[in-house]
């Protein structure tokens, strides 16, 4: 499996959930482990790879206790902003991943992929900061919009990871770079 395919499948596990007796059948820790394994297999020259690995380890560590229903429920009882803060390592990892891959794509001359990754990086930052408006400014009407934006972010991320997985700069086997006329 190519590095970004592993990461994409990890993001699928993180984005989906199905509760059985309070536990998520799509365990986020397993998803973050797949993401971390994918990042580990990226070329060593990938910008911010070490930061991605460190942030990925933190994200995995935070997700383990949150998989247990009692911990998750206690966190939710504290305040919604506390739950949001538990997601910050995940947003940081996705931001670093998009930024590092955008830099690698740009250095390899794959400007189309670099632009899309930079755009997604910006969207991640906006989505990560939406709860500040929802909880801090009391704009509760944006709560469902913020949740939907986070889910759509993961859909876009999975699609982009799979579409770029065969590129050499992403640890793929071939020298293929999409031309301007070719859909990505």
Image (cartoon, rainbow, N blue to C red):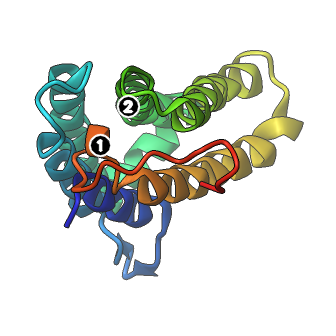
**Quarter-wise, where is residue 124 in the image?**
top right
Q: Residue at x 60, y 52 (%)?
A: 156
Seen in the picture, residue 125 relative to 170 is either above or below; the reply is above
In front of the other: 1 or 94: 1
Percent from the top left, x then y, of residue 115? 60, 29
Horizontally, residue 158 falls left or right of residue 6, namely right
Residue, far bottom: 20
Q: Which tag, 1 or 2, sits closer to the chain's start?
A: 2
Identify the residue at the far right of this view: 141
Q: Secondary structure at mark 2?
A: helix
Q: Secondary structure at mark 1?
A: helix
Instruction: Sort mark 2 into few (<14), some (14-19) or many (20+) by Cα contacts within 10 Å.
Output: many
Q: Residues at badges 1 and 2 in contact (C-beta under 8 Å)?
A: yes
Residue 85 visible in this rendered orientation of the protein: yes
Q: Position of residue 21 (x, y in %)?
A: 37, 82
Residue hosting label 2: 101
- The residue at which mark 1 appears reads as 170
Q: State which quadrant residue 47 falls in.
A: top left
The residue under the point 37% across, 28% down is: 108
How many circles with numbers are drawn on the protein? Answer: 2
Q: Is residue 101 left or right of residue 174?
A: right
Q: Where's residue 129, x and y in %?
A: 63, 22
The crowd level at tag 1 (other Cα within 10 Å; few <14, some 14-19, many 20+) is many
């Amino acid at each position: 499996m190519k590095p970004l395919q592993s990461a994409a499948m990890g993001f699928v596990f993180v984005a989906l959930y199905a509760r059985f007796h309070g536990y998520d059948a799509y365990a986020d820790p397993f998803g973050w482990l797949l993401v971390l394994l994918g990042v580990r297999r990226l070329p060593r020259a990938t910008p911010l790879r070490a930061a991605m690995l460190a942030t990925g380890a933190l994200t995995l560590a935070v997700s383990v206790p949150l998989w247990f229903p009692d911990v998750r429920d206690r966190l939710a009882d504290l305040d919604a902003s506390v739950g949001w803060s538990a997601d910050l390592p995940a947003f940081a990892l996705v931001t670093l991943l998009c930024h590092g891959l955008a830099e690698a794509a740009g250095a390899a001359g794959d400007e189309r992929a670099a632009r899309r990754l930079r755009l997604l990086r910006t969207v991640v930052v906006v989505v990560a900061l939406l709860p500040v408006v929802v909880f801090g400014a009391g704009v509760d009407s944006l709560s469902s919009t913020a949740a939907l934006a986070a889910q759509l972010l993961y859909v876009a991320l999975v699609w982009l990871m799979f579409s770029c997985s065969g590129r050499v700069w992403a640890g793929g086997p071939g020298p293929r770079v999409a031309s301007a006329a070719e859909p990505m």
